Image (tube, rainbow, N blue to C red):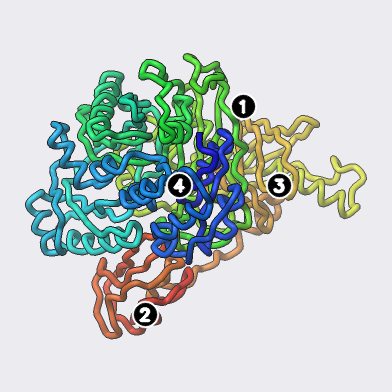
């Protein structure tokens, strides 16, 4: 077995590989850019080597620099993670020439299947059903428009070397095809150093389901079930689960066998993923093969008990698979939510900055994992797991140079409903401050009826949130639970204040029992009867709720039981109450005496400033292009400028008709959130 392995990546996947290497007794080597000098993967590794400036095209994807680090470290093997150089055949060739093992497939398999154009041609030649499209190279935007018309709108423009949603655009007409072609090329060049684009038919109402395969160099190949990845935004996966709530055993078997046959046809070894698009009748069509570890691999590990990174390392070491297809048992259900540094209240635009608070929920190992690394046939009732794969820490920086993913939060339980409920609690327990993030949106998805039913398609986010995410409006029953909890919490805080001030000898006599709780436009008059084990909160209509918990003033997280159900809330202090975040809602809760509540109703509301004549920068980023000048008349929906952040280009458009009166930025400028880019008359 190898004694030293270099991880040619960064962030959470580098940390993930380091954990398995450590478990196997293998020394790990990290590489890092100047922006990542204090990164978590650098701290975790046994060695770390600086390879260049922050931009990935000057550090992480420069083969010569990575190879120099391999030579300097004396590593015997390299794990590429995903993204960056993971599907770059030239990198695999360089390692082979240097006598260093590549923890991935052979060069030939990468060339055949890692390139999306080539892989689709091979699949077609092998008789695999594929989505209609044009697999040849596309010279320019005019040709892209011509091909799009031949294929028929809508079409998907995709980077040949792409992944993770980079270099992908959906076009519904000629204008979008022309615009999307250039943006896709730019993103592909910046992210992968390869700007080739191909076009395929965009299948409406599809489900995105992928098969995990694992092959060795001795002719053995297996599949480890499927992953449902249909909840996507801009073709970037957000929520994954295993198994799929849609597939039956016969379809799973057919997809799995086809995936393995395709992998073996190209001499594939290591872990890989064959992606399919599946229609409502369970017809499936080959999309592409990812010749690497997938971001969402933890959900497969949680339902199979197989450490995929360990298997990749063993295959790279020339070992035979010790797992047969009959050994693969899918036990229970796993959900993964991707935590992104994206502000859902600003159209999911990237957010950068310092993590002033980062407290993931405590990880819990699942019970049914047996000694040989495989699941037991049946999971015991009540078993559950929480796993958080991350590459950041409290006080660390979220950089503008890399992917916005902060962590992958996973839960496992014997049933899908239980796994979802565990995820709800885990999301509510996840504390992140200092940057915009998508935790509220993820909570909203976990409570959405379509997700709960398992009937989602890849159009879920677009259809259910057509105007973006504006937060969650909680139902009355949930507001009552929050009102009861915060009233009890306020009472505890009042007792503490009275004790600290020395104003009370007998706190039961000094702190009142009647309160008014105002939340989400509703007002609840309550009476609190406290005892050593908690409090009973009675509402004006005669109903009551029992509240118990160990929250004390100053705690950022309140883990309560209200009625018979848990309630987890992130807590902040505001004047006269609390800022409460739970189940995707961000609430200002005011707890007042009856007289204070009466006076509060007379207070005027604060009016927000008018910014309707300003184009504000929605995220920290770099101005790539300005499409207007002073004096231009713009129409609603017209492109105004392009901002690049976290390897993605974002086109800002006019919200209404107007005339440009002033332009405050130019290409190359770095802007902060809410900097004024353009002013209108």
Along the polypeptide, which appears first: circle 4 or circle 3? 4
Query: Residue 600 or 63: which is nearer the viewer?
Result: 63
Residue at the spot 36% in from the left edge and 32% down from the top edge: 227
Relative to 306, residue 116 above or below: below
CA distance separating discs 4 and 3: 24 Å
Marks 3 and 1: which is nearer the front? 3
Q: Quadrant of the C terminus?
A: bottom left
Residue at the spot 44% in from the left edge and 60% down from the top edge: 65
Q: Is residue 501 left or right of residue 415?
A: right
Q: Are marks 4 and 3 in contact (CB under 8 Å)?
A: no
Relative to 550, residue 498 above or below: below
Number of numbered callouts drawn: 4
Q: Which mark is residue 555?
A: 3
Q: Are marks 3 and 1 in contact (CB under 8 Å)?
A: no
Query: Residue 154 or 193: which is nearer the viewer?
Result: 193
Q: Which mark is residue 666?
A: 2
CA distance separating discs 4 and 2: 33 Å
Relative to 275, residue 233 above or below: below
Q: Which mark is residue 441?
A: 4
């Amino acid at each position: 077995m190898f004694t030293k392995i270099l991880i040619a990546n960064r962030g959470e996947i580098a940390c993930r590989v380091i954990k398995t290497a450590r478990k196997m007794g293998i020394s790990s080597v990290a590489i890092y850019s100047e922006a990542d000098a204090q990164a978590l993967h650098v701290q975790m590794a046994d060695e770390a080597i600086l390879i260049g400036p922050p931009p990935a095209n000057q550090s992480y994807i420069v083969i010569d620099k990575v190879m120099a680090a391999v030579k300097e470290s004396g590593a015997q093997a390299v794990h590429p993670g995903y993204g960056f150089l993971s599907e770059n055949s030239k990198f695999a060739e360089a390692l082979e020439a240097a006598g260093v093992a590549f923890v991935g497939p052979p060069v030939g398999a990468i060339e055949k299947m890692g390139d999306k154009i080539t892989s689709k041609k091979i699949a077609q030649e092998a008789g695999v059903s594929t989505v209609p499209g044009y697999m040849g190279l596309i010279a320019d935007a005019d040709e892209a428009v011509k091909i799009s018309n031949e294929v028929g709108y809508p079409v998907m423009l995709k980077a040949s070397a792409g992944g993770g949603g980079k270099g992908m655009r959906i076009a519904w007409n000629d204008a979008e095809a022309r615009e999307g072609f250039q943006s896709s090329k730019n993103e592909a060049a910046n992210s992968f150093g390869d700007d080739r684009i191909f076009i395929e038919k965009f299948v409406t109402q599809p489900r995105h389901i992928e098969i995990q395969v694992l092959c060795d160099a001795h002719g053995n190949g297996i599949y480890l079930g499927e992953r449902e990845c249909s909840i996507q935004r801009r073709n970037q996966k957000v929520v994954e689960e295993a198994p799929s709530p849609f597939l039956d055993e016969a379809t799973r078997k057919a997809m799995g066998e086809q995936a393995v046959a395709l992998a073996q046809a190209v001499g594939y070894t290591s872990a890989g993923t064959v992606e399919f698009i599946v229609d409502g009748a369970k017809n499936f069509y080959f999309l592409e093969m990812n010749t690497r570890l997938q971001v969402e691999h933890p959900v497969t590990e949680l339902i199979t008990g197989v450490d995929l990174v360990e298997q990749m390392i063993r295959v790279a070491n020339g070992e035979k698979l010790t797992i047969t297809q009959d050994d693969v048992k899918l036990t229970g259900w796993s959900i993964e939510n991707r935590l992104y540094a994206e502000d859902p209240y600003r159209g999911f635009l990237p957010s950068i900055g310092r993590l002033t608070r980062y407290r993931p929920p405590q990880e819990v190992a699942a019970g049914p994992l047996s000694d040989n690394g495989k699941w037991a046939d049946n999971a015991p009732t009540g078993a559950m797991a929480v796993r958080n794969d991350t590459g950041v820490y409290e006080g660390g920086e979220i950089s503008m140079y890399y992917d916005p993913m902060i962590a992958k939060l996973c839960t496992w339980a014997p049933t899908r409903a239980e796994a979802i409920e565990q995820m709800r609690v885990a999301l509510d327990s996840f504390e992140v401050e200092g940057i915009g993030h998508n935790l509220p949106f993820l909570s909203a998805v976990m409570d959405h009826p379509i997700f709960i039913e398992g009937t989602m398609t890849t159009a879920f986010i677009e259809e259910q949130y057509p105007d973006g995410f504006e937060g969650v409006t909680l139902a009355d029953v949930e507001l009552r639970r929050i009102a009861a909890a915060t009233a009890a919490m306020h009472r505890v805080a009042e007792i503490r204040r009275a004790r600290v001030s020395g104003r009370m000898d007998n706190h039961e006599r000094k702190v009142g029992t009647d309160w008014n709780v105002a939340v989400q436009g509703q007002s609840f008059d309550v009476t609190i009867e406290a005892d050593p084990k908690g409090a009973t909160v009675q509402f004006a209509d005669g109903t009551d709720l029992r509240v118990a918990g160990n929250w004390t003033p100053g705690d950022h997280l309140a883990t309560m039981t209200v009625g018979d159900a848990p309630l987890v809330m992130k807590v902040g202090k505001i004047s006269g109450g609390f800022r409460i975040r739970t189940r995707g809602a961000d609430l200002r809760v005011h707890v007042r005496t009856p007289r204070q509540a009466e006076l509060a109703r007379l207070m005027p509301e604060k009016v927000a400033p008018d910014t309707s004549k300003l184009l504000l920068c929605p995220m920290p980023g770099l101005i790539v292009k300005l499409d207007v000048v002073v004096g231009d008349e713009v129409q609603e929906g017209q492109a105004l400028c392009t901002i690049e952040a976290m390897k993605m280009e974002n086109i800002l458009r006019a919200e209404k008709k107007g005339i440009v009166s002033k332009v405050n930025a130019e290409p190359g400028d770095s802007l902060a959130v809410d900097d004024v880019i353009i002013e209108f008359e």
